[in-house]
Image (tube, rainbow, N blue to C red):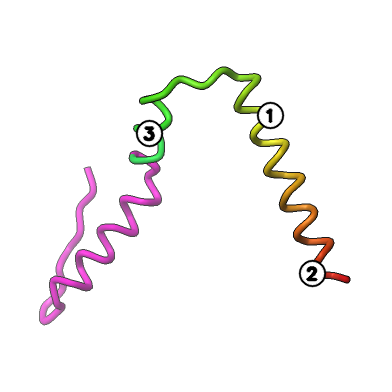
């Protein structure tokens, strides 16, 4: 359970923003979405490799 203490004089918008940030860090939503559609290990590994190659190519482009 996420608990956010609202400080004296703090706006609700700021407290809501802190709540959303904490909620995002827990990874609950990400895990929920991944459980909705099962993905085989081989497919997820292939996706990770493609993403790593993409990031590596982006780093090479910026250094040139």
* Residue 48 image position (x, y, % from top left): 66, 36
54 shown above or below 62: above
33 shown above or below 8: above
* Residue 23 image position (x, y, % from top left): 31, 50
Disc 1 to disc 3, C-alpha distance: 19 Å
Which residue is most to the right?
64
Task: Please tell me the numbered disc located at residue 62.
Answer: 2
Question: Could you say which quadrant of the image residue 26 lies in?
Answer: top left
Q: According to the image, label 1 marks what residue? A: 46
In the image, taking residue 26 as reference, residue 1 lies left or right, namely: left
In magenta stretch: residue 41: no
* Label 2: few (<14), some (14–19) or many (≥20) C-alpha neighbours in 10 Å: few
* Residue 32 image position (x, y, % from top left): 34, 32
Q: Residue at x 41, y 24 (%)?
A: 37
Helix, strand or loop at mark 3: helix
Q: According to the image, label 3 marks what residue? A: 33
């Amino acid at each position: 359970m996420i608990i956010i203490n609202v400080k004296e004089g703090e706006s609700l918008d700021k407290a809501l923003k802190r709540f959303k940030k904490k909620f995002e860090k827990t990874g609950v939503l990400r895990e929920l979405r991944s459980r909705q559609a099962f993905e085989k290990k081989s497919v997820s590994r292939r996706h990770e490799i493609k993403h790593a190659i993409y990031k590596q190519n982006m780093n090479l482009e910026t250094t040139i």
